[in-house]
Amino acid sequence: MAKLFIPPTIHTPADRIRASLDQAEQRVTNLRGAGSQALDLLHLLDWIAQRLAELETSGVDVRSERVRFETIQRQLCRRQRRFVAEVGAALREERASVQPDQTRWWWFLDEAVTQQQQRQLRRRLTGGLVAAVLLLVAYLAYDHFIAPPPHVRQAFRHSASGESLVEQGDLPAALAEFEAAAALTPDDPDPYLWQGVIYFELNQLDDAQAAFDTARALYGTDSNFLLARGVAYLHVGDLAAASADAEQAIIKSPHSGWGYYLRASVAVEQENYESAIADLERAETLARVAEDVQLEAHARTQRAHVIQLQMSR
């Protein structure tokens, strides 16, 4: 239990809380080198939370103290990795002894750090997949990347805005951006592909099919189309659709590792790490046989990331 060093001149409960807040502020800003003693901060937060609730219930105005308490919590949240590094396994042992509920979130900082690391690794995996597939499909001609004319640059901006809006969950606004991009570059399959995915998610299936037909024709091969669409579905969080495209890509091109690479990324989102590792190993093997240096490097790197995820869990 944290030791509350309260001067003897302090008599009122509010004074005691303010003195405890002073201690908590000092502890949260001096975590480096604290070791397992940093656990005292968690007991201190428990004490402050309980006393604030009691005073609020009795009608005492502790708004300023509540603001300070919330500020300390935000500081601890920002320093959670440092805190976990200092206390190590002692946090789990102390938590087992205290048995806090989830409202006292500071007792579960080790779990929060682990989840944060997993999210970062997942984003890294998805980012690597997107970069790899975009390089594979190369949906615009090479001269566009050398000196794209103004209308192509504007189309890029619309597409980038559309993808950002997709991440924010604003599908209707994203659809308008991809429609604007398609109007400027009608030979680019990517905006049509995104339109199809968004229409599909909005359950406008006829419009989705029409957009997909246009994109498929522009991509030239079913495999490239399926891979690109699977990545887009992965972006919007439709894992079932992304998985279906991965399976079809594997059927269409069984000797290509890209379908396995996509399926592995879906498995990671589903936290099925063993399947993801197996598919990445298969993708790496096929890439080596096909002398696809790019895919081989991506698959090897992503497999290492998935193993990290599996170990952290």
Image: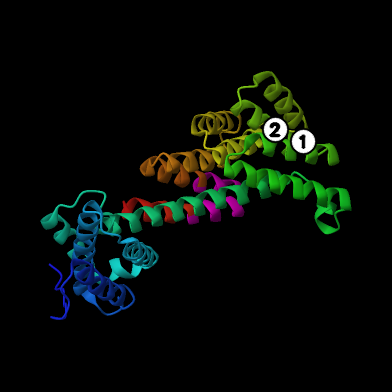
Residue 216 location, quadrant = top right
Task: Say which residue appears at 57% left-offset and 41% top-offset.
Answer: 235
**As drawn, 119 above or below 26:** above
Residues rendered magenta in the picture: 284-301
Report the side of 67 relative to 10 (left or right).
right
Report the side of 19 relative to 226 (left or right).
left
Residue 285: in magenta span:
yes
Q: For mark 1, give the secondary structure.
A: helix
Task: Say which residue appears at 13% left-offset and 80% top-offset.
Answer: 8
- Whether residue 303 is visible to the viewer of this picture, yes or no, is no
**Main secondary structure of the magenta stretch:** helix
Q: Position of residue 16 (x, y in %)?
A: 20, 71
What amino acid is found at the position of numbered circle 2 in the picture?
Gln
**As drawn, 255 above or below 89:** above
The residue labelled by disc 1 is 179
- Whether residue 270 is visible to the viewer of this picture, yes or no, is yes
What amino acid is found at the position of numbered circle 1 in the picture?
Glu
The residue labelled by disc 2 is 195
Q: For mark 2, give the secondary structure.
A: helix
Binning the other alpha carbons within 10 Å of mark 2 as few (below 14), some (14 to 19) or many (20 upward) gives many
What is the image's colouring? rainbow
Q: Earlier in the sequence, mark 1 or mark 2?
A: 1
Report the side of 199 relative to 303 (left or right).
right
